[in-house]
Amino acid sequence: MMLNDMHAADVPPAPAGYQMRPELSETFKSEKIREIINSVLVETLTGQTYSAADASRWTKSMADEISLQVKDLEMYRYKHVVQVWLGQQLGAGCKCVARCRWDTECDNYATAEFKNSTIFCLVTVYGLYLY
């Protein structure tokens, strides 16, 4: 497609050049993203039994699906990172820790977990605002 053939509806709006903070309507949508994470977790893992062979496929699939759905929220000035922890439920404890250096006024995250008798899964989506 040539540049001249493109219509205005085909091109996403360009972000403002020096916008230092997101508008209220443009902030990271934590609650909506948490709903997306929960939906993907339930859809993928409900009724499954832990299998080391399947765990890698599930984590990649969930990360990709969550990433696509987060992109559909059109938060143009945010970059996001999807982190998926999946393991076998054996009754032992597990601690997952992440540290980030970011702007607490703009950057944010959403997280959700899933457990059944054989699987535990923790998903976090980090949203980083681009100045």
Image (spheres, rainbow, N blue to C red):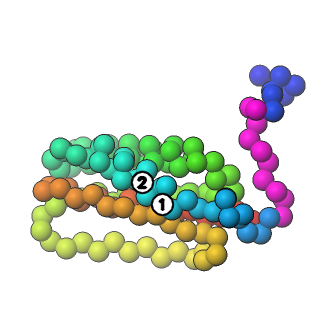
Determine whether, in the image, residue 66 is placed left or right of residue 19.
left
Q: Residue at x 64, y 70 (%)?
A: 106
Residue 123 visible at all:
yes
State the mark number for residue 22: none
Q: Residue at x 43, y 58 (%)?
A: 34
Q: Residue at x 38, y 43 (%)?
A: 61
* Tag 2 residue: 35
Determine whether, in the image, residue 110 is placed left or right of residue 108.
left
Residue 19, placed above or below residue 3:
below
- Dot 1 and dot 2 residues touching (CB under 8 Å): yes
Q: Position of residue 21 (x, y in %)?
A: 73, 69
Residue 10 part of the magenta segment: yes
Q: Residue at x 53, y 74 (%)?
A: 100
Of the 4 image quadrants, the one containing the N terminus is top right
Residue 79 vs residue 114, the one in the foreground: 114
Q: Position of residue 104 (x, y in %)?
A: 60, 77
The amino acid type found where label 2 is placed reads Glu
Report the span colored magenta: 9-18
Of the 4 image quadrants, the one containing the C terminus is bottom right
Residue 59 visible at all:
no
Residue 91, placed above or below residue 83:
below
10 Å crowding of disc 1: few (<14), some (14-19), many (20+)? few
- State the predominant SS element of the stretch in magenta: loop
Q: Position of residue 14 (x, y in %)?
A: 79, 48
* Tag 1 residue: 31
> Splitting the image into 4 quarters, where does residue 84 fall?
bottom left
Determine whether, in the image, residue 86 is placed left or right of residue 16.
left
**Element marked by disc 1:** helix
